[in-house]
Structures are given as structure tokens and as C-alpha cells.
Image (cartoon, grey):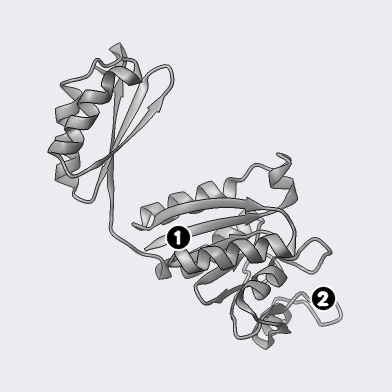
Amino acid sequence: MNVAIVTVGDELLAGQTTNTNATWLSERLTERGVSVERVTTVPDRIGDIARVVNEYRAEYDAVIVTGGLGPTHDDVTMEGVAAALGRSLEEHADALAWLEADGYSRADLTAGTADLPAGARPLHNETGVAPGAVLEGVYVLPGVPSEMRAMFESVADEFSGTQTYRAVVVADEPESALLDRVATVRERFEITVGSYPGESVRLALEGTDEETVSEAEAWLRERVEQPSGDR
């Protein structure tokens, strides 16, 4: 299963808010064996949301959109998703019933709070007000981290894939000097290798067979110079 994550918000693009939602979702999806292939941030503009969601839903098994839910002037995510799917926005009876059960009367709710794309499956917001929605492989979640996490957990079982295993070897050598050994370990073992330079170089080995990853890790450790603390 492959997934794209779309985070919505002008404040994310301006650096005023750290995009913790994308990191958390990527971690949780990876744990479930799902391949996260895109993480994109778009502004609070209907056209941008609609364009990206429409493009990604054609390419990936699912698209998770987070942020911009609610009835205020800059909460336009539902409208953008509805435009991408060619749907109108309609007040959803189940979403409205959940809100009333949580203690919100119709008089308390701002117009549009329970509006979802026509035909969508509503997702109950257990820790907030704005409901989420699922339609045609597009999952729309709130931007408030606590609300997003609780809502994702309610649909987490709908995301699954092949379990992957990971090991990291730290090398105290220039990245360019490791190219031959990286190429060899990839040829000998059915794994992928990511190289992340810094004070040392972190070589991340990943594969679908735990024993193969372990064998590749052992093979590589014997053939690189490791920082003194890692020996």
C-alpha cells in the first residue's frame, strides 16, 4: 500500500507551526508496512488543495489530508477535497448527531461545521469539534495534533502493507569513500540502503526479511570504520 500525505496551512509554509503531523503520520504508517511516497504542504487555498488531492488520488492507494477543518474563513480543506472529487458539500446527519451527543446544540454550532463532501463517510472527532471524512481513498483529518492522532487511530486498520525491517550502521568515513561497499551490500543482499551524512555517515539498511537485514548489517559493520563509541 502506498500513501501520500497532504498537510494544509499557511502557518506551516510560513514556519510559524512545526509540521509534526506529517512526521507522526509517516512513522505510524511505516510501522504498519505502508509506503509513504509523498509529503506535501499546501496553503489554505481551495484550488491548491483540489489540484494536489486530485493528482495524488490517481497515483496512490490513499491520500491523507490533515489541517484546515472547521467553519472559519480559512478552513477550506473540505471544500477543496469536495472540488477534487467533483462533489458538493452537504450537512451530514451522522456528524451533526455526534456533535449534539457531545453536547453541542445546533444553535451552538457555526454554519458549515458538519458539512462534508456528498457521499463521504464521516469520522467522529473524539477530542474536538470538526468531523473528518473518508471518500474514494481520501482521508480528511483535523490539523490539531491530538485530534488528528485520535481520528487516525480510528481508521488505522484500513492502512496495511508489507512489514519492513531496518538497521543502521554508522561509518566514520567520508560518504564518497563508502560507495563501493554500499554497492556491494546491495548486490549481495535483497535490501535498500540510505546514506545520511553528518559528523559520521549513517547507513540505513531496510528490507522485508528480518534475517537478511541482520546479515547485511553484520557484513557491513565488519567492513567500515566505526566511531570509537560504536565499536
Q: Position of residue 220 (x, y in %)?
A: 19, 27
Amino acid carrying mark 2 in the image: Leu
Q: Quadrant of residue 48?
A: bottom right
Give the SS element for disc 2.
loop
Position of the N terminus by quadrant? bottom left
Q: Residue at x 49, y 68 (%)?
A: 58
Image position of 71 (left or right of 222): right
Please tell me which residue lies in front, 166 or 178: 178
Q: Residues within 10 Å of mark 1 (few under 14, many from 20)?
A: many
* Secondary structure under the numbered disc 1 in the rendered image: strand
Cβ atoms under marks 1 and 2 closer than 8 Å: no
How far from the left and from the top, in percent, is residue 140?
A: 60, 67
Q: Is residue 24 above or below residue 125?
A: above
At 52% from the left and 46% from the top, the residue drawn is 23
The answer to whether 34 appears left or right of 92 in the picture is: left
Quadrant for the C terminus, please.
top left
Q: Which mark is residue 109?
A: 2
Q: Position of residue 196 (x, y in %)?
A: 39, 29
At 19% from the left edge and 46% from the top edge, which residue is drawn? Answer: 210
Quadrant for residue 2, please give it. bottom left
Say above or below: 225 vs 88: above
> Which residue is painted at 72% across and 72% down in the image?
79
Q: Amino acid at mark 1?
A: Val
Q: Can residue 130 be spotted in the picture?
A: no
Residue tagged 1: 3
Please indicate, yes or no, whether residue 112 appears anywhere in the rendered image.
yes
Task: Report x, y in % for residue 18.
Answer: 65, 42
Crowd band around label 2 with a 10 angstrom C-alpha radius: few (<14), some (14–19), many (20+): some
Rounded to the nearest angstrom, the CA distance separating label 1 from label 2 is 33 Å
From this viewpoint, which residue is outermost toward the bottom? 93
